[in-house]
Image: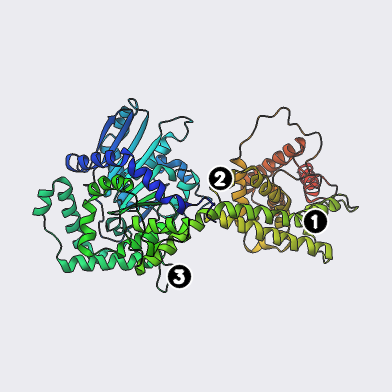
């Protein structure tokens, strides 16, 4: 186990690399300058060949303290700004969404502060760009990075982009996190979080009843960011109010980080990117969303009301200390000597997080880090296991292929689709139907694992799985269509294409369209395809058959025109497929549904 690569084993190494580089210190220096010099705006500066955009933490957040609302990134007004993230809408259970207040705050900066113009100007003088921000400025920096990545998306070569935030709140839902992961943008984000800072947990908590207290708190923070002397003059919360706020945030943090507990709730906001948890003892870096939520909860448990508020203003001290702490290497006493390098790494990670190793919280944090280690390995292991499962279901697919060949060569000349559609109590039909369900179960499991990020981010682009899912769709979906119409479900629910098609087929369509296509020479077919290249051909035919029946009984001439137009469109489409030999021979079989429909359509036209 110790030889296996994992997210956990690299967490302190990654933190050491970031902490010892000048990036954090330089970014924080610019954030502090923006806090005091550019309230509700940002600064742009070029240092060497690196451009920096630093967003001020002094920002006005709409609806501060009210129930936080999420808005879809494909909604009117912002859809063009985040197009690559919106293209995953069909694959995700809900659209990618961001906190409405944070999104409005960023759009106001973009609109009124000439963000595009200033960004273009500094990019012309640099080779890379770092976008940074403290507090609410970190949230603005995150959205700015997503906008810039989207802006550069069509271009194959562009400036390297890195986003570094300090004490930033979470900004969007789980679908946004997954869409960012699908785009492979997670590595572009480093979120620096102090172990005591309440701000990263604050906006995830329903605080409508504490709205006045939040206004006081934000005003204190904003004045302190502008100048420590101004902060001393600001009205502050009483010790009782601080304790009330702290306990509410801590309780909600505990509920969203422990999904198995009674009363637990789903987190409305979801992490993405690398989270750099720092303390006076060092830092660790995590990139697994579930582990990040857990560590946000556990590290806050080691804090106190007043400390959790003041620590939001202390990132300058943390950043300065982190690099020095990695020069002064940590050691263990003989009584606490770990049994293995893995246990040593775990102990160092807990020490860096500022969690006492013998503390009760440490045991929960240890479990969280071990979970992160397993989750880090899981996607590739799952993909390997699925490959084995795919080989095990091959006999089910082969039996359906054999069934298709036997139907296409049968004396009744019905073909594959119509043979399965007719009422048949044979053992052969029952076995094919059973295999159809087994294959559906397997591919539904693949989709579920992929949607829940249990598979590698590039899984849907791997040729093995794109080709396998496409072949499955072409082979089996005609049977699903046949079953749908054989059971007259179209009468109850409506036609298959709109009301009956399984979501997995729509996802496989998208995988196939997004595949890499190599240049080929003459692709003209010399014989009919083994499988019809439009898996929904028979569903389109069933709708055309329904239209043909409507023409026979429709007495209103005005209603006939659009029906005839639809029939003519399908006829041309089907004829084109046949001429290009992109259909299987069951389509043109003598007694197939299509052949009979075409004959009936010609007869109807002759009699008009």
Q: Nearer the viewer, residue 516 or 477?
A: 516
Label 2: element kind? loop
The residue wearing badge 3 is 260
Residue 600 on image: x %, y %: 79, 48
Residue 498 at least partly seen: no
Residue 48 on image: x %, y %: 30, 28
The CA span between labels 3 and 1 is: 42 Å
Q: Nearer the viewer, residue 236 or 361?
A: 361
Residue 172 on image: x %, y %: 38, 52
Q: Is residue 420 left or right of residue 488?
A: right
The residue wearing badge 2 is 458
At a point 29% along the width and 51% down the height, the residue shown is: 167
Q: Which callout, 1 or 2, points at the residue further toward the start of the chain? A: 1
Label 3: element kind? loop
The CA span between labels 2 and 3 is: 30 Å
Q: Label 1: how many residues lie within 10 Å, few (<14), some (14-19) or many (20+)?
A: some
Q: How many marks?
A: 3
Label 1: element kind? helix
In front: label 1 or label 2 = 2
The CA span between labels 1 and 2 is: 31 Å
Q: Are marks 3 and 1 in contact (CB under 8 Å)?
A: no
Q: Is residue 121 left or right of residue 466?
A: left
The residue wearing badge 1 is 399
Q: Nearer the viewer, residue 504 or 32?
A: 32
At a point 26% along the width and 42% down the height, the residue shown is: 28
Q: Nearer the viewer, residue 474 or 559?
A: 474
């Amino acid at each position: 186990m110790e030889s296996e690569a994992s997210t956990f084993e690299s967490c302190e190494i990654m933190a050491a690399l970031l902490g010892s580089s000048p990036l954090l210190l330089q970014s924080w220096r610019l954030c502090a300058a923006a806090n005091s010099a550019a309230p509700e705006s940002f600064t742009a500066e070029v240092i060497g060949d690196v451009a920096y955009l630093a967003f001020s933490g002094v920002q006005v957040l709409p609806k501060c303290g009210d129930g936080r609302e999420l808005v879809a990134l494909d909604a009117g007004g912002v859809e063009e700004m985040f197009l690559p993230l919106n293209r995953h809408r069909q694959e995700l259970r809900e659209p990618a969404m961001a906190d409405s207040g944070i999104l409005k705050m960023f759009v106001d900066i973009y609109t009124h502060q000439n963000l595009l113009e200033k960004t273009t100007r500094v990019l012309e003088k640099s080779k890379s760009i770092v976008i940074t921000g403290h507090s609410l400025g970190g949230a603005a920096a995150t959205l700015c990075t997503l906008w810039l990545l989207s802006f550069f998306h069509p271009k194959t070569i562009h400036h390297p982009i890195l986003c570094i935030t300090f004490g930033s709140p979470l900004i969007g839902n789980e679908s946004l996190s997954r869409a960012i992961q699908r785009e492979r943008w997670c590595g572009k984000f480093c979120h620096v979080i102090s172990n005591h800072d309440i701000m990263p947990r604050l906006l995830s908590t329903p605080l409508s009843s504490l709205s006045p207290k939040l206004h006081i708190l934000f005003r204190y923070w904003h004045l302190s960011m502008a100048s420590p002397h101004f902060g001393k003059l600001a009205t502050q919360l009483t010790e009782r109010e601080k304790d009330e706020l702290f306990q509410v945030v801590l309780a909600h943090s505990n509920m969203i980080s422990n999904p198995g507990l009674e009363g637990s709730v789903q987190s409305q906001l979801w992490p993405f990117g690398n989270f750099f948890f720092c303390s006076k003892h060092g830092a660790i870096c995590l990139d697994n969303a579930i582990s990040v939520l857990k560590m946000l909860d556990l590290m806050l448990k080691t804090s106190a009301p007043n400390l959790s508020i003041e620590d939001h203003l202390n990132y300058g001290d943390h950043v300065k200390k982190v690099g020095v702490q990695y020069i002064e290497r940590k050691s263990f006493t003989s009584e606490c000597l770990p049994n293995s390098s893995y246990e040593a790494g775990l102990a160092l990670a807990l020490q860096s997080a500022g969690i006492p190793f013998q503390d009760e919280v440490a045991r929960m944090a240890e479990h969280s880090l071990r979970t992160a280690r397993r989750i880090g390995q899981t996607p590739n292991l799952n993909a390997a296991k699925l490959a084995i499962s795919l080989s095990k279901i091959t006999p089910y697919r082969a039996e359906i292929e054999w069934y298709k060949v036997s139907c296409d060569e049968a004396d009744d000349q019905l073909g594959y689709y119509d043979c399965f559609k007719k009422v048949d109590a044979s053992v052969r039909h029952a076995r094919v139907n059973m295999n159809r369900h087994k294959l559906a179960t397997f591919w539904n499991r693949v989709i579920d694992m992929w949607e829940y990020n249990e598979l590698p981010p590039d899984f849907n682009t791997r040729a093995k799985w794109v080709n396998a899912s496409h072949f499955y769709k072409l082979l089996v979906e005609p049977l699903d269509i046949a079953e749908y119409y054989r059971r007259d479900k179209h009468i109850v629910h409506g036609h298959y294409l709109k009301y009956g098609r399984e979501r997995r087929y729509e996802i496989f369509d998208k995988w196939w369209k997004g595949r890499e296509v190599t240049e080929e020479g003459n692709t003209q077919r010399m014989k009919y395809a083994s499988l019809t290249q439009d898996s929904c051909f028979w569903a389109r035919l069933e709708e055309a058959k329904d239209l043909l029946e409507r023409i026979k009984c429709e007495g209103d001439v005005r209603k006939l025109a659009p029906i005839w137009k639809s029939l003519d469109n399908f006829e041309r489409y089907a004829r084109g497929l046949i001429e290009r030999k992109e259909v299987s021979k069951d389509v043109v079989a003598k007694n197939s549904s299509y052949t009979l429909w075409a004959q009936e359509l010609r007869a109807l036209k002759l009699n008009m």
